[in-house]
Every structure is written in structure tokens, then in C-alpha cells.
Amino acid sequence: MRRAALSLVLFCASFPLLPSSTTLLAQDSATIPTISWKDAGNYVDKEVNVVGRIVRATRGRSGQYYLNFVENWKGTLSIYIPRNAAARFDPNPEDLFKGKTIKVRGLIYLFKENNTDELNLKVEDPKAIVIVPGDSSSAGEPEATAHPSNGSSSPNTPASASSSQAVRAEEYLPTIGVAHAGDFLEQEVFVIGKIGGSRQVAAGHLNLDLQDEQGHTLKVFIRRKYLPNFPASPAQLYAGKVVRIRGRLYLFENKPDLPITHPGQVRVLPDDAKPPTEPQWPIRIKPAMSAAPGAEITVGSYNLLNLFDDVDDPYYADDILDAKPRHELEALATSIRKLNADVLAVAEVENRGILETFARRFLPDMGYEPVLIEGNDDRGIDVGVLSRLPVGRVISHRHLRFKDADGKVSRFRRDLLQVRIEPPGGTPFDVFVVHLKSKGGVEEGGIETRTAEAREIRRILDDLLKRESQALFVLCGDFNDTLDSEPLMSILGKGATQLASFVNDLPPDNRVTFNQTPHLSMIDFILASPGMAGRYVAKSYGILPGSPETSGSDHNPVFARFRVGRPR
């Protein structure tokens, strides 16, 4: 009965005898602007009603849906319906809306897609989408506008973080004037200036001159293929306007250059808005890899519990809804500050981008450089390193194939990441990071896979120790098994090449790293080669207790101190 009633309502909503689109639009609050989908780039971080005709509707692998207003949707607005919300539509969003003119209400925001900012509007309530009568692509669509009214907001005021769990660029990117562009090469920034002249070059690309009152000029470059992303010629849209542009600065022909691809990167500011006289940071970020170690450093290992971003990666079983909640990010940062590790091995991180964003936004004063290479996990969780000591070579073992006890070909379910750490004035050493196959809640679950991974790890370490018996390295991570298990015994080895565990330095009542009942156990470790064990600071091995509520993770981090000075 409910399905029949809903279908009838949606059928009636598309019937031409219903109230006009003017009536439908009038039902919304006057404070929410109604815009054409073509103008979405001018309303980033604003709640709007968007009107347009859906010509493309697709279902993602995880059950989410995307609605688009053009077939070639890159650089234009996408309507995103998460899988849990899609289940509330009957029939599905594709059958409901493809070919229909809709009005959809929501917040327009940017997300990263192949290193490009894309426009998105997420819908979680079916009531947010209304079918507008008529099938014309312009039915009910408001006139195009060059830019929204900006009110009296300051050009340097960050958008409210409370409106989304996402970490916004305004929270950590610097804002600069044109004169300082040369000081931020290869960095992403906001640049404020006034658009002066423009030039169409021979290949069809467009250059805009971003200027300040002192006569400094920065070239804003738009490739020909991206010009259709703009509702009108950018030269006409922005001529004489004071704008804030987000982008990554490059050096081209010995001058700073700022490439952009769509209007979502450009925000028109009030005419009297002024660029900062000096670069402004919403938070002060300490230069990465800045620590000058003394005789000792701290190495830590921490499973960060699904450090996911709010972008749905079509190649993995993640979703925007999987983004780590902001309160967990803040708790995690507090825990890492208490740990204060010089080198921190991490697990359950979706990608390098979220690791870098997390470090820059929540740990800006720690001086961490993120290291991560994409691994094999179907969910997209990877292992990585945060280091404030210089990083040398980095090796991934994700492509290795090896056999398990039954002769079946296997591989690391995530990776075995190898990172060379090079302390200034000290002795270099390697950090190996692992995240072995989990038990899945079953006592011996995944034992064959874990054992195969463990034996391959031991083979790799043995090869290293054969070449250099006193090789310096630590093996850190979430081993998903206890120290007396077959996989861990395989890794530890025996005799002269046995790895040291330091667990006996812990009080018996503080040997829990997985902190969720009823599975309280110690499954995270820092193991050391014989040479590195000789540099271990006695009784320095420790565990920092916590919980998802207090520390942002279901694992407790482990840490140990080592002497890294060169022998005399």
C-alpha cells in the first residue's frame, strides 16, 4: 500500500495539471536561493534550491546513485544519493528522475575526484527532490546568474565546520595576495585579487590576469577543454570582479601560474574586499619533518580506525557516509599529541590525501610528513607513516605473490610498507608497517591468510638480515593476532635473527591494544631487529589506553624509544 501510494504521488508530481513551477518554488523559504544547475559553482558552501533536467543517472557499485544534468558531467554539479538514502526511493532514483526536470534542495560542496575539485550536492531525504512539470531542459529553471550575492561576509572567514563532518579547505589552506604567489609554489592556496585583462591564446586556452593595487599580476590559466564548465565566458563572468580563487600554484616560464578547471574554484567577493597584506593561515602549520632529534626518538604504532574522507571512491567499497566523524578526528588528534611520536606507523587510512588533511588540520604543530602507498584492501584501507624526521626511500610490497600452507597463491591483504627514516646527524633505520588479515570475530578466522603473510614478512626480513646482520629496522602495526600465535611466532623467528618484542616491559594489567569487549587483547606491536633492539631504551615500551569515544579508535597505540645517534 505504501509503495502504491508513493508511486501515485510521484506520478501525479509529473502530471501537467499540477500547480505551476512558480507555485512549487514559492513553497520554499525566501532565504534559500533558487538557481540553475549551471550556476552551482558560484554557490559553494551555500544551501540552495537547484533546478534542471536530469539526463544521466547511474548507480554505483555500493548502491549509491548519481544524477547529472549533462552527459559529460565532469566539472558540473552532481546530485549524490547515498545507498542508505537511495533505499527510501521507490522506484529507484534512476527510474524516478532520469529525463525529468527536478528541483533539489541541499548544500553545494566540493570534493576531490582524481585530484580535481568536483561540485556535489548530497540528498539524504527523498523530500528534498521535487519533480517539476514539463520535460523541457529549461522548465522551471531560473535565469543564469554570474555570481551569488555575497552579503557582508569577510573573504577570509572560513565556512562553518559544523554544517558538515568534512574538513573544509578554509580550515587549513593559507589565503594570500597576488604579490606572495611566488612564495607558495607547488602549494594549494586561496588567492585574492581583481580580474583585469584576459587573453585567448592560439590553442584556445584562456588566461585571466589576477591583479592587486600595487600592480602585481598572477596568470590564471584555463584550458580550452574546461571552458564549457563555466556558464559563460570566464572573461565576461569575472571581468573587473574581486575574486578568491582556490588552486595549486606552479611555475611556468619563470612566473607563478594558477590553473583552474571550473567555477567552483572561484568565489566572487564584494567589490571592497581586500587581499591580505601578508599570508594568512587559519592555523599555523609547522614545517614537515622539522624535528632535530636528540639521542633518543619515539616510535609509535596506531590503528586509526577507518580514517576515511567524505568522497565516494568508485573503485573501492567506501562511501561518503563512511567519513570519520569530526569528534573522532578531534579525539584521535588528542591521543596522537599525548603519544608525541617522532615516527608513527598508522593503519586503516583510506588514502594519502585524508592522512595529509588530518595532519594539517588537527596536528598542524606536530610537523608530520605523511607517507602512504595505496595497497590491496577492497575497502581501501591502507598502512602509512607520519614522520617529523626526514624520509628516504619508500618501498611497497603490495604486488608480491606467495603461497600459503596449501599451496594457494596469496598476497598481502593490505601491504608491507617499508619506509627509510634518516634522522639528521643520526643513523638511518627502516620502519616496516603491516596490517595483517583480521579474524573477523572468529577465534581462528583468517589464520591461513595471516600465517602466509607472516611467513612472507619473515622471508623479506631474513633477506635483509642476511645482507646485513645488524640492519636497523622496526616492524610495526596491527597484527590481528597475539604474540603466542602461529603468525607472530613465524615473524619473531628464532636464534640470532629473532626479533625483539619488549612486551615483558609492560605491567600485566596494561597489555591491551584492541580495546573493545569481549575481544580485549594485545594485537598491536613494535618489533625490532637485533641491531635496533640494541638501541632500545630500557622500560620505554608503553601503551596509551583509550576507546573510540575518548581517543577516536578501537585500538590503543603502542610506543617505544630508541637511540639513533651514530656510534662513536
Image (cartoon, rainbow, N blue to C red):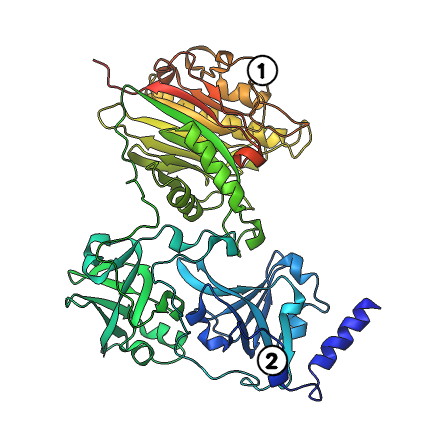
Q: Earlier in the sequence, mark 2 or mark 1?
A: 2
Circle nearer the viewer, 2 or 1: 2
Q: How many discs mark residues in the rendered view?
A: 2
Image quarter (top left, top right, bottom left or bottom right) of the N terminus: bottom right
Q: Left or right: where does residue 228 sit relative to residue 564?
A: right
> Where does label 2 land, which residue?
26
Q: Residues within 10 Å of mark 1 (few under 14, many from 20)?
A: few
Q: Is residue 400 visible?
A: no
- The structure residue drawn at horizontal position 39% and vertical position 51%, both measured from the top left corner, is 171
As drawn, 508 above or below 244:
above
Q: Left or right: where does residue 189 sit relative to residue 95?
A: left
Residue 183 picture location, percent across and down: 20, 53
As drawn, 505 above or below 230:
above
Q: Amino acid at mark 2?
A: Ala
Residue 525 picture location, percent across and down: 49, 23
What numbered label is drawn on residue 295? none
- The structure residue drawn at horizontal position 21% and vertical position 25%, both measured from the top left corner, is 425
Residue 451 picture location, percent across and down: 57, 27
As drawn, 169 above or below 358:
below
Dividing the picture into quadrants, the one containing residue 532 is: top left
- The structure residue drawn at horizontal position 51% and vertical position 74%, both measured from the top left corner, is 33
Image quarter (top left, top right, bottom left or bottom right) of the C terminus: top left
Q: Label 1's element?
A: loop
Q: Amino acid at mark 1?
A: Asp
Q: Left or right: where does residue 100 sit relative to residue 298?
A: right
> Where does label 1 land, which residue?
509
Q: Nearer the viewer, residue 155 or 340?
A: 155
Q: Is residue 107 visible?
A: yes
Residue 69 picture location, percent across and down: 53, 75
Q: CA distance from mark 2 to mark 1?
A: 65 Å
Dividing the picture into quadrants, the one containing residue 228 is: bottom left
As drawn, 197 above or below 330:
below
